[in-house]
Image: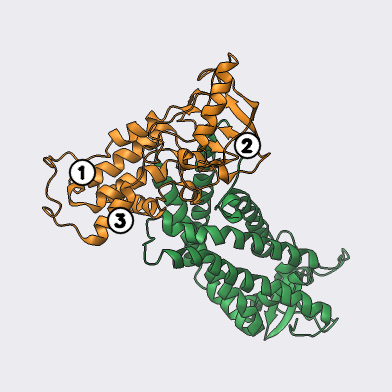
Amino acid sequence: MNLTLHVWRQQGPSAPGRLVTYQAKDVSPDQSFLEMLDGLNEELISRGEEPVAFDHDCREGICGSCGVVINGVAHGPEQTTTCQLHMRSFKDGDEIVIEPWRADPFPVIRDLMVDRSAFDRIIAAGGYVSINTGSAPEANGIPVRKEDADMAFDSATCIGCGACVAACKNASAMLFTSAKVAQLARLPQGQVERKRRVLNMVEQMDKEGFGNCSNYQECEAVCPKQISTQNIAVMNREYLRASLSGA
Amino acid sequence: MLPSSIAKKAVVAVTGLLLFGFVVVHMIGNLQVFLGRETLNNYAEFLHSMPELLWAARIGLLTAIVLHVVFTVWVWRENRASRPQRYAVERTIRASRASRTMILSGLLVLSFIIYHLLHFTVQVTNPDYRQFYEHQGRPVTLVSYEPPPQPSSSRPEAVNGAEDAPETIASEASPRIETIPAESVPVEARRDVYRMVVLGFRSPLIALTYIIAQLLLGLHLSHGASAMFQTLGLTTPKYRKAQFLFGPAAAALIVLGNVSIPLVILLDHWAGLGLFDV
């Protein structure tokens, strides 16, 4: 099938960007969205033009590297990562607008690539446990309730792709931050730093310049790992409890 | 130190919860208009019987409104700043219309509240309401007594007498102005809230303003009354669905209750049913 692509092209962080139109010809419906972009880049290189820069790594939906906004939806029409989105989700003759994640704390590096190190700094502010858990302890060494283990695991599936920020009308990082807070608050290993963690991570999140939560639920709707906004309620509870009890 | 994003939203949620509670109590109080003059005026008299408590509530509500608006505008400005470069194509998948128009519905409801206070509480838009009194179970209009121009030869006692009773009470039914000594007015007559409400909503423009404002309030609460659970961390996996339904359900009841007052009064007036005795 043949498609018309409008791709955001931007030379560097401070350079002005614009949408450039390209024709993608003979696209197979079995190709992934990234393979379609690979095809476009091969053609651009053969014409002596600069290829479109975009982030990608594992291409199997687990690393969180890839991610672009496709026709106004983070990761496009399927609720999965961009690498797992296939061209069968589009029709011959479709026009596709491809833009990078847009948020003040996610500056564009080039074209569709954004700098997501703000997420790393949020994790570094408290998204870890400091106690030594040793080498691969026996699964049942420390008892964890089945319900807690399941909920902690659901939160832990976040791959940090940033689609929640990209989809949020306020460019808020509440879903990302809350997933880590909720995961570690559920587990015995996370109890020591429980209060400090939530206070420090929220402080860092605010410092990065992410927006506030308006309970739109847009983040949950695009999350490739279906992280629930219930995590945000847990983080709000953890934060208010920690600040009221004076951590 | 500036409050965190979560703390700011918590202020909005707590003040919102307070204002939501007020809206519910206010509606239940006002629905007494359907029970007749005596019930509604008793209720109004009861509210005004404890001025200290009334003013404490008024100041509390005013503070809640100011905090609610100031913090909302604050987070709204931050939210705008966190995405300076907009998307060329923007789509909404799940966010409700109500959630996306909170700032607009909120500011419109705020302007309605200001009008509502000027209309029924301060009564500057309709100053004739200040003359509506209930005297011995009957509506009366309190009018200012203007002493007729006195000839210079009149005796001084007559002038003094007119000053002692500057106000008179006149029965609506009778064209003759019945004079009542001024000092007896506060004892026997009380404010006729019932007549104020019924005559107020017989004006189609005023009734329409109130109905539109209640629809906007409903839109605002359909998101707000659910979101406050989430913001205060009170949603739990088990009751999550019910908590998200609470807002729309509560908003529907409030719209129904509040719209019924101007709507029924206006329809009754147009149809000439005479359900309301003024």
Of callouts 1 and 2, the N-terminal one: 2
Instruction: Please tell me which residue is depicted at 37% across the width and 60% down the height of the picture.
Output: B234
Say which colour chain B has: green
SS of the residue under disc 2: strand
Which is nearer the eye, B275 or A60? A60
Q: Residues within 10 Å of mark 3 (few under 14, many from 20)?
A: some
> Distance between the Cα atoms at labels 3 and 2?
37 Å
SS of the residue under disc 1: loop
- In the image, residue B72 above or below residue B253: above
Q: How crowded is mark 2: few (under 14 residues within 10 Å), some or many (20 or more)?
A: some
Q: Which chain is orange?
A: A
Q: Which chain does the numbered disc 3 sit on?
A: A
Q: Name the residue under label 3.
A: A151
Q: Which chain does the numbered disc 1 sit on?
A: A
- Is residue A239 visible to us here? no
Label placed on residue A193: 1
